[in-house]
Amino acid sequence: MKSCLGLGCLVTLLATVALAVALAVTCPKPAEHYKALNELVGHTIESQAASSDGLAQQVIAALGRVAYDQVGSGIVERMVHVDDYVVLSIGRMHWQGEDHVVSVGILGHVVTPSEAQLAEAVREAL
C-alpha cells in the first residue's frame, strides 16, 4: 500500500478542513429559517389573493395577509423546530403525528418549498 504523506494528501486534508469550516461558519441560524418561512407564507397569501376571482375573496385574502403579518412570526416560531448540525440546519414542523422538513439551511441560504408547494400542502391539510 502507498503511504499518504505526500503534498497531494496534505492539500486534500487542508481543503477538507477549509470546506468544513466554511460550512460551519455560514450555517443559517433558526431566526433565518423563521424569516424565510414567514416570507414564503406572506408571498403565498399575496399570490392567492391576486388570483382570487371575486372581490370578496380578494378582500378576505388581503385581510388574511394583514392578520398574518401581525401574528405570523410567532406562529412559525412555535410550530417550526430548527436542528443545527453544525454544517447545515434543518427546519421541521410536527403536523398530524409526523415531522415534515420545511426548510434546509446551508452556506448562508435557507431553502424552502415553493409557493405552489405550500399552497398544495395547505389544500391537502384542509
Image (tube, grey):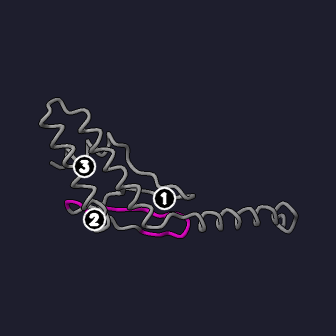
Q: What amino acid is found at the position of numbered circle 2 in the picture?
A: Met
Q: Residue at label 3?
A: 65
Q: Residue at x 23, y 60 (%)?
A: 95
Reading the chain from its start, which is encountered first: label 1 or label 2?
A: 2
Determine which quarter of the picture holds residue 60.
top left
Characterize the local packing of mark 1: few (<14), some (14-19) or many (20 or more) Cα atoms within 10 angstroms.
many
Where disc 2 sits, the SS reads helix
Q: What amino acid is found at the position of numbered circle 3 in the picture?
A: Arg
Q: What amino acid is found at the position of numbered circle 1 in the picture?
A: Gly
Q: Between residues 21 and 15, which one lies in front from this camera angle? A: 21
Disc 1 to disc 3: CB gap under 8 Å: no
Where disc 1 sits, the SS reads strand
Q: Is residue 126 above or below residue 107?
A: above
Span colored in magenta: 83-96
Q: Is residue 17 above or below residue 69?
A: below
Q: Closer to us: mark 3 or mark 2?
A: 3
Reading the chain from its start, which is encountered first: label 1 or label 3?
A: 3
Q: Between residues 53 and 3, which one lies in front from this camera angle? A: 53
Would you say 5 lies left or right of 73 here?
Answer: right
Quadrant of the snapshot with the N terminus: bottom right
Q: Is residue 85 magenta?
A: yes
Q: Residue at label 2?
A: 79
Q: Residue at label 1?
A: 105
Label 1, label 3: how far apart the Cα atoms are: 26 Å
Reading the chain from its start, which is encountered first: label 3 or label 2?
A: 3
- Residue 108 horizontal/vertical position (percent): 55, 58
Label 1, label 2: how far apart the Cα atoms are: 17 Å
